[in-house]
Image (cartoon, rainbow, N blue to C red):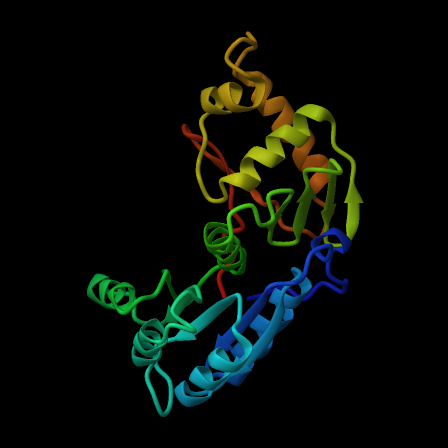
Amino acid sequence: MFSKPTRTPSSFANRAAKPLVLIVEDEVDLVTLLQYNLEKEGFRTISATDGKEALLLAQEQRPSLMLLDWMLPEISGIEVCRQLRRNVETQSIPIIMLTARSDESDKVRGLNSGADDYLAKPFSPSELVARIQAILRRANPGMNDEVLQYGDIVVDLAAHRVRRNGRNIHLGPTEFRLLRHFMQHPGRVFSREQLLDSVWGNDVFVEARTVDVHIRRLRKVLNNENEADLIRTVRSAGYALDAGNDL
């Protein structure tokens, strides 16, 4: 489930104009959860509950990105996607298809209809935010280059500041570089050797267990008692930034 921490959106996530996400979903409870969690991560949201309304709002509001459910009243998500791609005024809107259909053939069909990404329910809220950020970066080169977000963690690269759940996190230089590397590659597992090369550099000769020491330090500072540990240890493989919580 999406968590509901009591905080306002990060101040440095609000420096630039907030991206507008159009949520097209006929499950009212899911719309409410998506709106709450996206808005606390610095997005603006609008919603539609059927295909016709989705096409109208896409035309009128020109959202930065659309979350589009496959099974919709009036017009299916697949057909909405096709019509948006045929319209010169809406054809560049990034679309993430949300659906309970997880077969490979369904995924291929969704992508072939014009969707930029496909996410099967249930899905991780942190993964959804990470995919939205990745698509927006591809659609708008240079956007958010100085701000990285994953779940309730926001890293301001320019100001060298980290916040989690609305509070300031004070990291040493190595822990900051380590977190930045994870934030730039959410979900990917890195071995100790890969982290040494990427974070410490090829010319620095330190033992692999040094990574473990700094991972422990990062976890200690990053996680409060009631907060999930977002750094996953993968036995015999390494570490990854991975919330692992399903909606």
Kindly indicate the quadrant of the structure image that contains residue 77.
bottom left
Q: Position of residue 167 (x, y in %)?
A: 79, 49
The answer to whether residue 191 is seen in the rendering is yes
Taking 61 as reference, is 26 left or right? left
Residue occupying the point 51% across, 46% down:
242
Kindly indicate the quadrant of the structure image that contains residue 152.
bottom right
Kindly indicate the quadrant of the structure image that contains residue 86.
bottom left
Q: Position of residue 41 (x, y in %)?
A: 65, 60
Taking 7 as reference, is 176 left or right? left
Quadrant for the N terminus, please: bottom right
Q: How many marks?
A: 0
Residue occupying the point 47% across, 80% down:
59
Q: Nearer the viewer, residue 132 or 145?
A: 145
Q: Position of residue 245 (x, y in %)?
A: 52, 57
The answer to whether residue 26 is seen in the rendering is no
Residue occupying the point 45% across, 83% down:
54
Extreme left residue here?
105
Using the image, determine if residue 186 lies above or below residue 18. above
Q: Position of residue 184 (x, y in %)?
A: 53, 40
Residue occupying the point 53% across, 65% down:
64
Taking 106 as reference, is 227 left or right? right
Extreme front residue here?
88
Using the image, determine if residue 172 lies above or below residue 147. above
Q: Nearer the viewer, residue 135 or 2?
A: 135
Using the image, determine if residue 191 lies above or below residue 90. above
